[in-house]
Amino acid sequence: MIITIDGPAGAGKSTAARRLADLLGFELLDTGAIYRAVTLAARQKNVAPEDDASLKHLLDQTRIELRPGEVLLDGEDVSSEIRTPEVTAAIQGFADSRLVRKIVTEKTRQLARGRSVVTEGRDQGSDVFPDADCKFYITASDEVRAARRHAELLAKGIRIGISEVLSSQRQRDLQDASREVGKLVCPAGAIVIDASRLSEDEVLTKLIEYLPRGIRPLDPRDHVKSLANDYLSQGDPLGWFDALYASAHRDTSKIPRADRRPNEHLMDWLDRQRIVGDGKSALVVGC
């Protein structure tokens, strides 16, 4: 099953897609990460975005894989490398390439084949998966989106006026809506959700309300079993552990064993040893 979530920048579609995928036990198809991996590969080989011949040769020889919490480029985990400022600054040239767009679209469809996925972007329900089982379009007012982005920048220590953020955002919206390839549109048949006055939890609730009948949120224990089996089939019996915690994004409801209570055996030992911990630090080693 394929669920697409499209919408303008800052509307909250990325967070909504991740949370919905986690809740349903679906895979999150991060198409942005694929474009970043393409950009990284091209930069490593000094291939320019306008050099179609070299780009095609490079991408024909390059293997990109998505795993929970990981992006692999020819078998190497490049999850951190694709998020560097250098890649971010260069990605637009490759994302606007008609050739790259075509190749990534084909790759995205291959990755989704036979799987249950949630994918988000600006052309997922219109161009990449026009026959998706369920399509959403999440939007929000210009002012709300700019305010969210402004708060994010301030949290990172970047001082900038709200009017400047709003102006930059409107310019990007215009560019996204007028691109030759991968333009931002509301897909035919998509369910529109205005998130201007909705919290992240309320957006998630709306998405669940509109899902086709028969789809139910996944029990966290089922997700753990599915993740463990996936890594076992890859010959990596321990890989699921880090992937589970990475995919939870600090949400302890996604970790079945996280009861958020002190371990009773540890507490008993502390009492018997008469340990007084006030003002002290402790290192607890688990296995």
Image (cartoon, grey):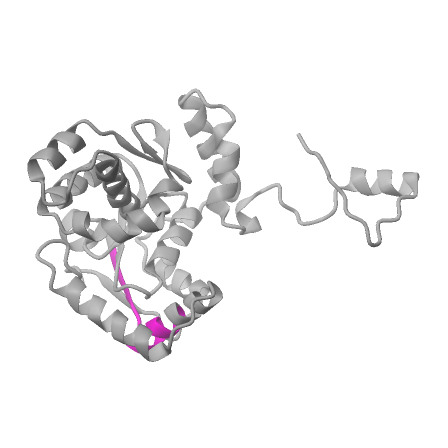
Give the residues in magenta. 135-148
Residue 141 can be seen in this image: no
User: Which residue is situated farthest in the top direction here?
Assistant: 235
Looking at the rendering, in which quadrant would you find the C terminus?
A: top right
The picture places residue 158, in percent across and down from the top left corner, at 43, 67
Determine if the magenta segment contains residue 152: no
> Which residue is at a point 35% across and 60% down the rendered structure image?
207
Residue 209 can be seen in this image: yes
The picture places residue 256, in percent across and down from the top left corner, at 58, 42
Q: Residue 16 lies in what quarter of the image?
A: bottom left
Q: Is residue 174 shown left or right of residue 15?
A: left
Q: Nearer the viewer, residue 216 or 45?
A: 45
Q: Residue 28 lies in what quarter of the image?
A: top left
Q: Nearer the viewer, residue 211 or 286?
A: 286
Determine if the magenta segment contains residue 136: yes
Q: Is residue 22 shown left or right of residue 281?
A: left
* In the depicted structure, whether residue 198 falls above or below residue 246: below
The picture places residue 53, in percent across and down from the top left corner, at 7, 35
> Which residue is at a point 38% across and 73% down the rendered structure image?
160
The picture places residue 56, in percent across and down from the top left corner, at 11, 34
Looking at the rendering, in which quadrant would you find the N terminus?
A: top left
